[in-house]
């Protein structure tokens, strides 16, 4: 990446947007040489909308309810391609990404999941970890592929599970780690430091 040229990012979010905030804060501090060009949400009531507007980031509400299969993804591809987006960041986006979007942005869509993948995929990962009796939980940043939480893993961070943990207390500690490793993964991508070897994501070739 040439010095001074900022990569254009898009964030897809459905909720309160805490990871969106963590990544944008890192950009504002100068840690990541990029800009969030647009926030797309499928929830008109999402808390992240007000946050983005206060930070002068364009918001596009694209409701997915009632659309035929693939229609949301095709609309997103058209918009994101038109804007020259180089990386799509899923930040609490409560919708499975379809093949039109994955094929248009191969290994250019990131997600964060509150478990040490490949353990506890899907919804309620923290609850799954507690019910299983896991001693270690955590979070994983990964590229998105056609499966659910199955793409190549970029970064992970472990979180010990305490004997008296609830879903809420464990989730809170995992979220604090998410706010650290998600911006770091975006930074590595922006600096062209990630390479894919099969399922392995190499950092600086290692």
Image (spheres, helix red, strand yellow):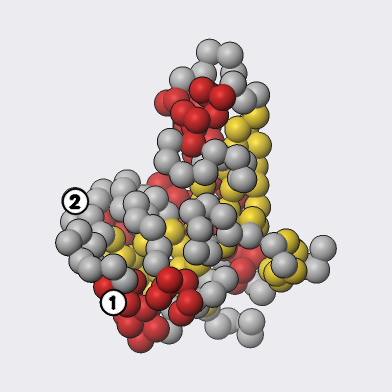
Give above or below for 37 relative to 114. below
Q: Which mark is residue 6?
A: none
Residue 88 can be seen, yes or no: yes
Camera-side residue of 21 and 43: 43
Residue at 74%, 69% in the rendered image: 197
Residue 21 can be seen, yes or no: no
Q: Residues within 10 Å of mark 1 (few under 14, many from 20)?
A: few
Camera-side residue of 57 and 125: 125
Placement of the C terminus among the 4 image quadrants: bottom right
Q: Which residue is mark 1?
A: 75
Q: Which residue is mark 2?
A: 45
Give above or below for 186 relative to 104. above
Residue 68 point in image, percent of width and height: 23, 68
Q: Quadrant of residue 50?
A: bottom left
C-alpha separation, residue under disc 1 versus residue under disc 2: 20 Å
Residue at 60%, 32% in the rendered image: 137
- Mark 1, secondary structure of its residue: helix
Residue lying furthest front: 69
Residue lying furthest right: 206
Q: Residues within 10 Å of mark 2 (few under 14, many from 20)?
A: few
- Left or right for 205, reference 189: right
Residue 151 point in image, percent of width and height: 58, 59
For marks 1 and 2 on the same chain, the one whose residue lies earlier in the sequence: 2
Q: Nearer the viewer, mark 1 or mark 2?
A: 1
- Left or right for 203, reference 59: right
Residue at 28%, 77% in the rendered image: 75
- Mark 2, secondary structure of its residue: loop
Camera-side residue of 192 and 52: 192
- Left or right for 54, reference 116: left
Give above or below for 153 relative to 38. above
Residue 71 point in image, percent of width and height: 27, 73
């Amino acid at each position: 990446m040439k010095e001074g040229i900022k990569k254009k990012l898009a964030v897809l979010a459905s909720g309160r947007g805490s990871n969106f905030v963590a990544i944008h804060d890192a950009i504002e501090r100068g840690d990541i040489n990029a800009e969030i060009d647009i926030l797309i949400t499928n929830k008109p009531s999402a808390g992240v909308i007000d946050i983005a507007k206060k930070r002068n980031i364009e918001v596009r509400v694209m409701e997915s309810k009632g659309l035929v299969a693939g229609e949301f993804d095709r609309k997103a591809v058209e918009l994101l391609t038109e804007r020259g987006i180089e990386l799509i960041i899923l930040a609490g986006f409560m919708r499975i990404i379809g093949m039109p979007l994955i094929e248009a942005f191969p290994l250019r869509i990131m997600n964060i999941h509150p478990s040490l993948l490949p353990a506890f995929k899907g919804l309620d990962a923290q609850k799954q970890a507690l019910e299983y009796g896991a001693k270690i939980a955590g979070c994983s940043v990964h590229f998105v592929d056609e499966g659910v939480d199955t793409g190549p893993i970029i970064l992970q961070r472990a979180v010990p599970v305490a004997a008296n943990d609830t879903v809420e207390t464990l989730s809170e500690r995992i979220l604090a780690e998410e706010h650290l490793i998600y911006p770091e993964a975006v930074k590595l991508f922006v600096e062209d430091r990630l390479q894919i070897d099969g399922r392995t994501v190499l950092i600086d070739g290692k």
